[in-house]
Image (spheres, rainbow, N blue to C red):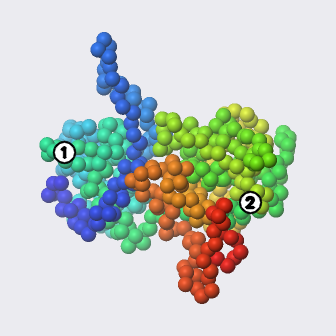
Amino acid sequence: MSSSFRGIVESLKNVSLADITADLEAQQESVPDDPPLAQASDDCVVDRAVLREQISKASNSTTERTQKEYELLQKAFLVWLEASSYWPSNTPFFTDTPHPDSPALIVAWIMSRCDVKDANGRAIPRSQSRQSYSYAQKMRAAMTHAFGHNCGLGKNQWHKDDNGVWKGNPSVSDTVSGYFVNLRRAKTRAGEISTSAKAIRHEALKKIYDFNQAHNRSVPAPYVAGAKTGDQDAWGSPRIRLQTYAMMLISFWCLLRCDEAVRITFEDIEFTPGDEKTPPSVELTLRWRKTDQFGQVKPFRLYRLDEKEAYLCPVRALAAWVSCAGKESGPLFRKMNSGDRVSDEPLASETFLEWFRNCLVDVDMLPFPYGTHSFRRGGCQFLSAYLRWGARKIADWGGWSTEFSWVTIVTYLINWSDSEIIERDNFLRPGMQPVIMCSVCGRNCGCGAGY
């Protein structure tokens, strides 16, 4: 790192190796692996640059909206770089052989937008607006994507090889990770706390289920052209609520990201009738996952739960939605047209989030701490705390690496924004009995004497 970045050097003080390692691993997880470049035969002339460009486009897993955000941020960085005195003009920055000062320049750019000091250690006037920590993460993600995907450097950590040459992705470096650890601390001390989406608890799902049942919002009426959709004070029709709840439970049980759930099609699910020994079930086979973008996604087999657990039963919820959707192919979850008609277009993540938060308002829960990631978090915690699944089993089910080289699953199981399964005040309360676990299902005995 160049000695001219005095403010960056100061920002890396008092950062532990463990914090840097955790940040590096999380950043590496966000970068998908690119497929290998095809080898050309001796009798075929191939423009490898063109071939690599085509492979890069075909393997890009980011959504169109995210891609546009990354491109805008990358252009903004280049404009900043040209206006600064850190980089020679007319010299490419994003290449597959990055300059040794690339990590410091990335940090300097983020500091100029988000920090209280610039790269030279000078205080930025308070009159100048500052971007949030979340925005800083987006800026870094754009840099990670530019070097990792566009330049073909992937998730390889920035390092110096045996010949003294710097290699890897500059955004996945000790310099950038160390800076982000301190930036988070500074933002927290300033009162700006970056909070992950709060995990949805199964008790909240039961409240939503009971509300819909009690207010007759789970029985859709036959479609009649020009007819009103029911209670005009209600935010959504029974069809909307059935669809919303089905997507909620599928995301909760299968630990899905929202963009994975909205991609499910009717062809991806298969209902299986039960028999005397096995209850009815549904098999969900995803064609695409963020961590398995090139196939080989393990299917999810979900079984119908007992009547007393109907509020958590994904099979019942899916069957209820499919029976009233009136569709047999294409997207499973869809937009709704006027008159409560199911359209042919897939449901947007933003629409699902709006419907989900409306459900929370119905049961007098504050909606804003929750997001589309709440189900992945909540399902992970439910499998651990109530079904007593081990971390390796949860990782295999949810699509995480079972080598535990990533810390994501830990942040899902232990997150300060989520309420405790056991209230802290009861940890040492006299008379509290140890939890009695069922040897068959692994759950608490349910007598109320335990935690």
For mark 1, give the secondary structure: loop
Image coordinates of residue 214 in percent, x first then y, are 82, 62
Determine which quarter of the picture holds residue 432. bottom right
The amino acid beneath tag 1 is: Asp
Question: Can residue 17 be seen?
Answer: yes
Q: Residue drawn 45% across and 64% down?
A: 194
Along the line of sight, which residue is nearer the eye, 236 or 290? Answer: 290
**Neighbours of disc 2 within 10 Å: few (<14), some (14-19), many (20+):** few
Give the image location of residue 419, x and y in percent. Answer: 56, 70
| Residue type pointed to by label 2 | Glu
Pick whichever, 361 or 428, lies toward us. Answer: 428
Snapshot quadrant of residue 181: bottom left
Q: Which residue is labeled 1 in the image?
A: 161
Foreground residue among 75 and 192: 192
* Residue drawn at (65%, 56%) of the image: 356
Relative to 233, 436 lies left or right: left
Above or below 28: residue 288: above
Mark number for residue 309?
A: 2
Residue that appears at 16% across and 45% down: 162
**What number is the disc on residue 288?**
none
Q: Is residue 135 above or below residue 298?
A: below
Total numbered labels? 2
Horizontal and vertical percent position of residue 193:
44, 68
Give the residue furthest to the bottom: 430
Query: Could you say where residue 82 lies in the image, as x and y percent from the top left?
Result: 24, 45
Taking the view exactly as shown, the residue that stands out farthest to the top is 43
Name the residue located 64 percent from the left edge and 50 percent from the top edge.
Answer: 250
Q: Is residue 83 above or below residue 447?
A: above
